[in-house]
Amino acid sequence: MNIPHIDLPRIVVIGCGFAGLNLVKTIRSKDYQVVLFDKNNYHTFQPLMYQVASAGLEPDSIVYPIRKVFNRKKNFHFRMATVHQIDSDNQLVYTSIGSIDYDFLVMATGADSNFFGMENIQKYSMPMKSLVEALNLRSVILQNFEKALHTSDITERQALMSFVIVGGGATGVELAGALAELKRYILPKDYPDLDIRKMQIHLVQGGDRLLPSMSSKASDNAEKFLRKMGVNVWLKVRANDYDGHALSTNDETYYTKTLVWTAGVKGVPTPGIKANYTKACRVLVNEYNQIEGYSTVFSVGDVAAHISEETPYGLPMLASVAVQQGVHLGKNFNRLAKEKELLPFEYKDKGTMATVGRNLAVVDLKSLKFGGGFAWFLWMLIHLMLLVDFRSRLVVFVNWAWSYIFYDKGTRLIVRKVPDKTQTSNNH
């Protein structure tokens, strides 16, 4: 693997999401050699991925090259590779480009879509947990309208112009709002030959309210905003099966060529660690983010679960949790280098927010809960500041300003032809 051995302890970090990125940033270079593995050569700002899927932002405005982030960090090595296995007995990590030994190991592998064993939904739906999946969804949305233009089958046209989003969390709510804005402001100008009024957006939620991790006031506001924007919100409706044409639920059948799955996530731990896991495949960690049973193996971010009386299912799988865990573990490594004892991790909940659409968002703070225009402005400001670098902030700000002033989204490009999953499966 051509990584030099030096007289410093080696920390191997798997994954450069919010947790891995902030961990590596915080670790002092003079005390450790850090080796970071990720299957991509970029960090993705996932909270804005739905805007790429809905043609609101270019993909390169929410990703940042890992090598550029750390190009001034000494004793740091990045390798783009897939990590296959961990041998904790011999302190080895096996990857697609070879094996490497470690003194400390951090699993920050994040999460992926959870389909709860429903194979057909996994096969035919559109997930949105990676940049590639977001770009695929953008292409599918636009391809559908191109196909709708030249089909004479009214039923087929309606299915092409109907979109069902399963999952009423932040991603589902934000994507539904973004599609509603496309319907209102963009698509009528792009497709004057189609009656865009017949485009249907359905948001299907198994629970009795949207945004279940937020306050009931935020849930009520989000539902009110979405209904006002023309989104069909269905509560207490659970998806059962989908064949690429029809989604069957416990309530009724929805005919759509595009089912977007945002209904669940699960951790993606690297095999080889002998540990306890939650039902959502998250590895159990103690208050120091150590994996139970290990003193030199840690886990942070979505794949890690702090179980306590207050959090029986672990801390929420949010960027804010991952950032705080990464920074805290980095500081603990710095303490270890000075032979100081580790400090326990405590999550500081600074509030949660979700945007619904133009001038519409919901914000939950500890002492204040509100929605509307100011909440939307606050959401934009905070997300701008959380982006990795100034260039990304500038590009996103210009895009948002352009879209707001001119009611336009500039990235309505089909850059990848996404095959119809029903056709490809029939061919096989």
Image (cartoon, helix red, strand yellow):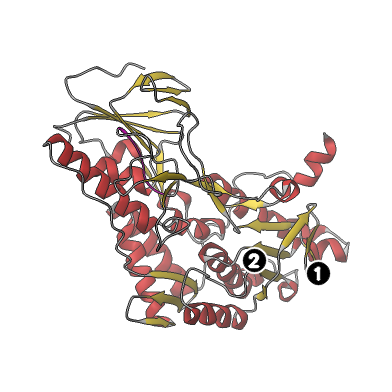
Q: CA distance from mark 1 to mark 2?
A: 32 Å
Q: Give amino acid for label 2.
A: Asp
Q: In the rendered structure, which segment of residues is drawn in magenta?
A: 296-301
As helix, strand or loop, the secondary structure at mark 1 comes to loop
Is 208 left or right of 200, judged from the image as shown? left
Identify the residue at horizontal 54%, vertical 49% (top origin).
Answer: 280
Q: Position of residue 230 (x, y in %)?
A: 65, 79
Check contact, mark 1 vs mark 2: CB within 8 A.
no
Residue in the foreground of this view, choosing between 10 and 191 = 10
Please tell me the numbered disc located at residue 148. Answer: none
Q: Secondary structure at mark 2?
A: helix
Measured as percent of width and height from the top left, residue 379 is found at 38, 70
Quick one: 244 or 318, which is closer to the camera? Answer: 318
Question: In the rendered view, does 421 fall on the left or right side of 84?
Answer: right
Magenta stretch encompasses residue 119: no
| Residue found 35% across the figure and 22% down from its top | 91
User: Which residue is painted at 45% across and 31% down in the image?
Assistant: 273
Going by the image, does 288 lie left or right of 47?
left
Image quadrant in which the N terminus is located: top left
The answer to whether residue 27 is visible is no
Residue 299: say if magenta.
Answer: yes
Q: Residue at x 13, y 41 (%)?
A: 340
How far from the left and from the top, in percent, is residue 167? 61, 63
Q: Amino acid at mark 1?
A: Glu
The quadrant of the image that shows the C terminus is top right
Which residue position holds label 1?
252
Residue marked by disc 2: 190
